[in-house]
Image (spheres, grey):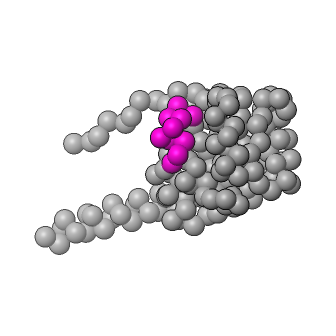
Amino acid sequence: MSTPLPETPEPVSLTPALVVEDDPAMQQRLAHVLGTLGCTAPQIAWADSVASARALLAERSFGVALVDIGLPDGSGVDLIGWLRQHHPRLPAVVISAYRTEETIFAALRAGAIGYLLKERDDLELVIALRSIEQGGAPIDPAIARRILGSVSYTHLRAHETRHDL
């Protein structure tokens, strides 16, 4: 018996956007990427730490949060978990250089709706973020392949275990 798929996710507004990123060069890059998607400077709030993100969230609402994992005062994964508890309607997308399986799965379990790698070019990030507006959940292709490999391996091991009984 198969499990029914969950409801189709609702589209996400990229404005206003909360960007939690401590690297000034990456902030500029994300400003350009979001600008390509029609987000103007006043529609983007910048936080360079977990604490500054929480302060901004106390002041206003956002359509989406783009969160780096490695922040100077804590983990983006922890921030995403906090968002899930305190702002459950705010979707969070990871944009990070971290690509370890442990970090990826921790972020997804914490509530991230997508996981993108900073190493991708701007066009790829634009396309991934555009998919969020349409209800998608973008995962960097290299990460998606690892997740699919993990699921396939887990399924194969479960199948082998049942036949061994």
Among the 4 quarters of the image, the one containing residue 3: top left
Left or right relative to 120: residue 92? left
Q: Residue furthest left?
A: 165
Residue 85 falls within the magenta-colored stretch = yes
| Number of marks in the rendered image | 0
Q: Which secondary structure dominates the residues rendered in magenta?
A: helix
Q: Residue at x 61, y 54 (%)?
A: 76
Residue 156 falls within the magenta-colored stretch = no
The spot of residue 156 in percent (x, y) is: 33, 65
Q: Residue at x 64, y 36 (%)?
A: 57
150 shown above or below 14 = below
- Residue numbers of the magenta segment: 81-90
Left or right relative to 11: residue 124? right
Depth order, front residue of 34/59: 59
Depth order, front residue of 58/39: 58
The spot of residue 139 in percent (x, y) is: 59, 49
The spot of residue 60 in percent (x, y) is: 67, 29
72 shown above or below 31 = below
Q: Residue at x 25, y 69 (%)?
A: 160
Among the 4 quarters of the image, the one containing residue 17: top right
34 shown above or below 13 = below
Q: Residue furthest bottom?
A: 164
Residue 102 visible in the snapshot: yes
Q: Residue at x 57, y 34 (%)?
A: 90
The spot of residue 152 in percent (x, y) is: 40, 60
Left or right relative to 107: residue 20? right
Residue 115 visible in the snapshot: no
The quadrant in which the C terminus is found is bottom left
